[in-house]
Image (cartoon, coloured by chain):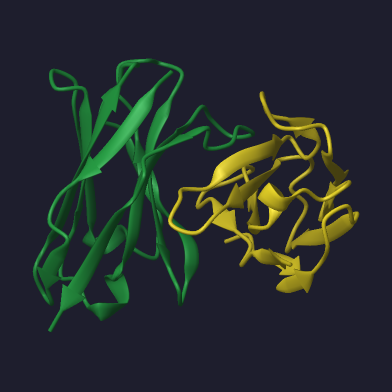
Chain colours: A green, B yellow
Amino acid sequence: QVQLQESGPGLVKASETLSLTCTVSGGSVIDTSYYWTWIRQSPGKGLEWIGYIYYTGATRYNPSLQSRVFMSVDTSKNQFSLSLYSVTAADTAVYYCTRERDSGWPFDSWGQGALVTVSS
Amino acid sequence: DIQMTQSPSSLSASVGDRVTFTCRASQSIHSYLAWYQQKPGKAPKVLISAASSLSSGVPSRFSGSGSGTDFTLTINRLQPEDFATYYCQQTYDTPRTFGQGTKVEL
């Protein structure tokens, strides 16, 4: 059974960069079946898809965040990461890492979530 | 982006009730719809995919239906552990989008 675990600072200053890592256990980021995804949840905007990365490094981002997002994958550590630049209070949210197979498939495994607060 | 609209935003129910709530997409998504259950402090858990396909381990009192733009999630004989928030999500296109949720309260 695959498990995902988010890690990273819980507090980020406004205008700085939010960085999170997701460690995958019981499975492999090299699994060609899956796209490794970041989703966030805030009271104001509900559940928001940030984007995904494939093991090859191919990415697809939400256009609403595309100018500030970067994702990477480290196959040697079985991890993938999220960077969100120039954060504001609106980026305060619980950030989840998850996975999906492709269009038509749900997000079937989720991390427990990491609360990130942006402070002024 | 495909907009997902759920109704109602909340509903009150009792153990043993049958509850139904809906999700509407802003354009046809065929059967590319998933339903999730979320409890406070926890990640969402997938219940149904492809509009009506029950995920492994999900009780049979949950069922989904619909296609195109209109979808329904039904819970028969509501159990105490079913009080939670339910989200729909379109799996048809990126960016993936979710409804705003329906909270089932006692």
Going 76% across and 32% down the picture, which residue do you hit? Answer: B59
| Quarter of the N terminus of chain A within the rendering | top left
Going 84% across and 38% down the picture, which residue do you hit? Answer: B61
Q: Is residue A75 visible?
A: yes
Between A60 and A17, which is closer to the camera in this rendering? A17
Q: Is residue A35 left or right of residue B23?
A: left
Going 70% across and 35% down the picture, which residue do you hit? Answer: B49
Q: Quadrant of residue A29?
A: top left
Going 75% across and 58% down the picture, which residue do you hit? Answer: B27
Residue A19 placement (x, y as % from top left)? 15, 53
Residue B41 placement (x, y as % from top left)? 43, 56
Between A89 and A85, which is closer to the camera in this rendering? A89
Residue A64 placement (x, y as % from top left)? 39, 65
Q: Is residue B8 visible?
A: no
The total of numbered circles placed on residues is 0
Q: Quadrant of residue B23?
A: bottom right
Question: Among all residues in the image, which is located at the extreme bottom?
Answer: A120
Between B101 and A90, which is closer to the camera in this rendering? B101
| Quarter of the C terminus of chain A within the rendering | bottom left
Q: Quadrant of residue A81?
A: top left
Q: Is residue A94 left or right of residue A104?
A: left
Between A25 and B14, which is closer to the camera in this rendering? B14
Vertical position of residue A7 compared to residue B70: above or below: above
Q: Is residue A112 left or right of residue A67?
A: right
Residue A32 placement (x, y as % from top left)? 40, 16
